[in-house]
Amino acid sequence: MDFCDLRRQYSFLRKPIDESIAKVLEHGLFINGPEIKELEEKLGNYVGKHAVAVSSGTDALLVSLMALDIKPGDYVVTVPFTFAANVETILMLGAKPLFVDINPDDFMIDADKLTHFLENPVDPKTKEKIESGRIKAMIIVDLYGDIADYEKIEELAKKHNIMLIEDAAQAFGAEANGKKAGAYGDIALTSFFPSKPLGGYGDGGMVFTGDANMAEKIRKIRNHGQEGKYIHEIFGMNFRMDTLQAAVILAKFNEFDNELEKRRKVAAFYDENLKELEDKGVLKLPRIKENNKSAYAQYSILAENREEFVKHLREKDIPSAIHYPKALHLQNAFSDTGYVSGDFPMAEEISGKIISLPLDAYKTEEELGEICKAIKDFY
Ligand SMILES: *Cc1c(COP(=O)(O)O)cnc(C)c1O
């Protein structure tokens, strides 16, 4: 059994994917071919924003920060419990990450802690108060395919005059009150890393914004800041998605809503079959907010005695993954940010207990039953 079976997905979608790739090989426009624009239009319509295709989710974060003119010395608020790309891109621009801890329900940013932090923000290194206006942006992460609590977050961003970036790398396809992931904040982004809910066959990302001028600026940044050929209007680089990747994603996008339904069915199967273990207090299952529909990038649970549990699953040939084993403020690569162990107790606790179960749109009931049985056997 694969944790996320991309080969099986290909066996179902082979024909449209092969045809879409073949079209690119025929027309030969490997950079900026027509599939790029088609993908931007389709995904832009889906989300209800302007869309700009880029080379990866990480680059989408970098481009978003560049588009907001984040400069050395600026502060950017984000979470310590996610994939590392948020911190990397902030540091890449010479800016300083400020972490706010996560909440124990959905493991995304704790809106109350954020409220409190923004009232009296302090530099983690100097311990001095941060003057108002120096926090330029927030990168809020939609974890595991669900959407963060943007009602409160957008209000705070407005109140403190901070630009808001929605990192929907894991949440493309999700909805909150009928509004799609990628539609929040000043700029939003997603990733097409192969195992994401809408994955390509390589790296790719998309930036979304409701602001047409901002979309134009992002288009320039991704193409060396060019206004016309060899006329470099603003600072940019090569952040382009290639046409072949767009062709793959376009073919998969036709099936995407069906696949989302299937992912939700897998999650519902786990919910139903593992509930008794939650009632016993040995597992904690995902909490999706009432009006939200998760894209279930992951089905991640808190598990007692995780290391033994993983070993038991491995013995039964059941793969699992840990998203994420070490909070970002404790990572060696980011030790210069000024944070220490104990600063974010929730992120630290959750990283010791979280575990993701196998999930893709094509898992069979038989496989899911086998997984749940192995889990019940252990507990
Ligand atoms: C995957 C991911 C990214 C990075 O996307 P890539 O396409 O792998 O560069 C950024 N943020 C989050 C939350 C992610 O899960």
Image (cartoon, grey):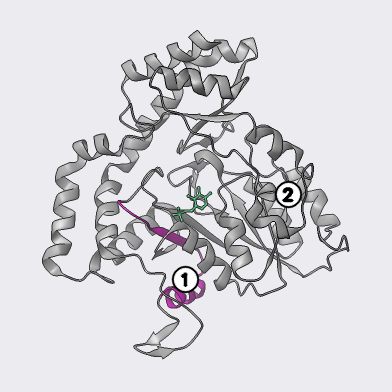
What segment is highlighted magenta in the picture?
A: 201-222
Image point (82%, 68%), residue name:
132
Q: Which quadrant of the structure image shows residue 319?
A: top left
Instruction: Name the residue that disc number 2 marks.
Output: 100
Is residue 14 located in the magenta-colored stretch of the structure?
A: no
Q: Nearer the viewer, residue 291 or 118?
A: 118
Residue 111 position, x and y percent, is: 72, 45
Image point (17%, 43%), residue name:
14
Residue 35 position, x and y percent, is: 25, 63
Q: Is residue 368 above or below residue 29?
A: above
Please name the amino acid that badge 1 sits on.
Ala
Q: Is residue 297 above or below residue 157?
A: above
Q: Which quarter of the image is occupied by the C terminus?
A: top right
Dot 1, crowdedness within 10 Å: few (<14), some or many (≥20)?
many
Q: Is residue 138 above or below residue 370?
A: below
Q: Which quarter of the image is occupied by the N terminus?
A: top left
Q: Nearer the viewer, residue 72 or 331?
A: 331
Q: Is residue 185 visible?
A: no
Q: Which quadrant of the structure image shows residue 102?
A: top right
Q: Residue 266 bears which disc, if any?
A: none
Please name the amino acid that badge 2 sits on.
Val
- Secondary element type, mark 1: helix
Q: Nearer the viewer, residue 350 or 36?
A: 350
Dot 2, crowdedness within 10 Å: few (<14), some or many (≥20)?
many
Is residue 220 located in the magenta-colored stretch of the structure?
A: yes
Q: Position of 96 compared to 218: left or right?
A: right
Instruction: Name the residue that disc number 1 marks.
Output: 215
Q: CB atoms at circles 2 and 1 under 8 Å apart?
A: no
Residue 22 position, x and y percent, is: 13, 57
Mark-to-mark CA distance, 2 and 1: 29 Å
